[in-house]
Amino acid sequence: MKLSILDQARITSGNTAVQALKNAEELAMLADELGYHRMWMAEHHGMDVVASSAPEITIAHLAAKTKNLRVGTGGTMVMHYSPLKLAEVFKTLSAYAPNRIDFGVGRAPGGDGNAIYAMSEGKEPQMHNMYEKIEQALQYMKDEVPAKSPYNKTIAMPSQIALPEAWLLGSSGNSAIQAGRMGIGYSFAQFFNGSMTHDILDSYRNNFKPSAFLEKPNILVTYMVTVAETKEEAEFEGLPYDISQLWLMRGMIKPSLTPEEAQTYPLSEIERMQIREFRKRQLHFVGDVQEVSAQLRKEQAIYGFDEAMLMTVPHSQEKRLNSYRLLAKELLDK
């Protein structure tokens, strides 16, 4: 199975943003050694629990620290940026690291209302034309000039570079159709709402048109996983994430607990039922590495996707790195 990594540079309790970014660097270097295919950095704004606010800068650093690993954004939030600037950034990245850069783009804001308005300098955010902006950025990357003003009177430099891989992130049929029509990869966020269906993925495949970016459909699916050598240890390490998801449902965003703190957190029976529902909806796979690997293989057999992108967020960096080692040994060596 082709394996990749999604990282948000999470700031766990007792740690700092600087350490979270250094942890991302350490993870990328390990992923490169283990044979992971790509690593994406998310984009989040105005959140003191996530340090990945400028993924295009982070991936430039990660590209310089690795040799074979593809690095990219998962995703760049297109609503905040000009198509010209997007093209300039990713063409520059690709000039420095040819055939290793991914332009993963999403339509979510990556932050709350305050962050959205700060990103748009207090102006009304433009949310109606995001697919059009993505298409214009892709044209610029191909050294073409979009037809529509104000983009039709300038070019995006540098030119004549290896095209980055282009991906559209989503969790709905609409984004799947648009990704297919643009001829770019489709990344489905199963960990986001657990709503993957054959119909969504088929709508991408059925609408796919070959492009300069991609000759045939390419689908990756992102899963949140917590693995360890034993199921008991995985449950211990995974509970803080489940509790943080309960908080998120209530609009509470704060650093996740340590595993020890989570064990004494006063969960109600309703909350325990909600956690069981998270697992049932495949928002979080928890178990020993053999069990979770079997679940991932089963998912691939059912849906036929090309690549699994994994995110795991134990409190300890040592535990997180070991989780990726275990998954690589189980899924990449077989």
Image (tube, rainbow, N blue to C red):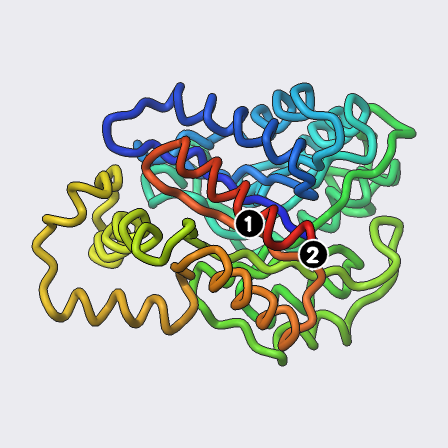
Describe residue 76's horizontal placement relative to residue 288 as left or right. right
Residue 130 against residue 279 in the figure, above or below: above
Which mark is drawn over residue 327?
A: 1
- Along the line of sight, the residue nearer the viewer: 243 or 170: 243
Crowd around label 1: few <14 · some 14–19 · many ≥20 (10 Å) = many
Q: Position of residue 63 (x, y in %)?
A: 68, 25
In the figure, residue 205 lies in which quadrant?
bottom right
Instruction: Check disc 2 and give the amino acid type.
Output: Lys
First in sequence, mark 2 or 1: give its number. 1
Determine the residue positioned at 47% across, 64% down: 291
* Count of number-bearing discs: 2
Determine the residue positioned at 37% across, 24% down: 17
Determine the residue positioned at 41% across, 63% down: 283
Which mark is drawn over residue 36?
A: none
Crowd around label 2: few <14 · some 14–19 · many ≥20 (10 Å) = few
Q: Please state, as top left, top right, bottom left or bottom right, where the N terminus lies in the image.
A: bottom right
Q: Which residue is mark 2?
A: 334
Q: Position of residue 214 (x, y in %)?
A: 84, 54
Instruction: Check disc 1 and give the amino acid type.
Output: Leu
2 or 1: mark nearer the eye: 2
Tag 1 secondary structure = helix
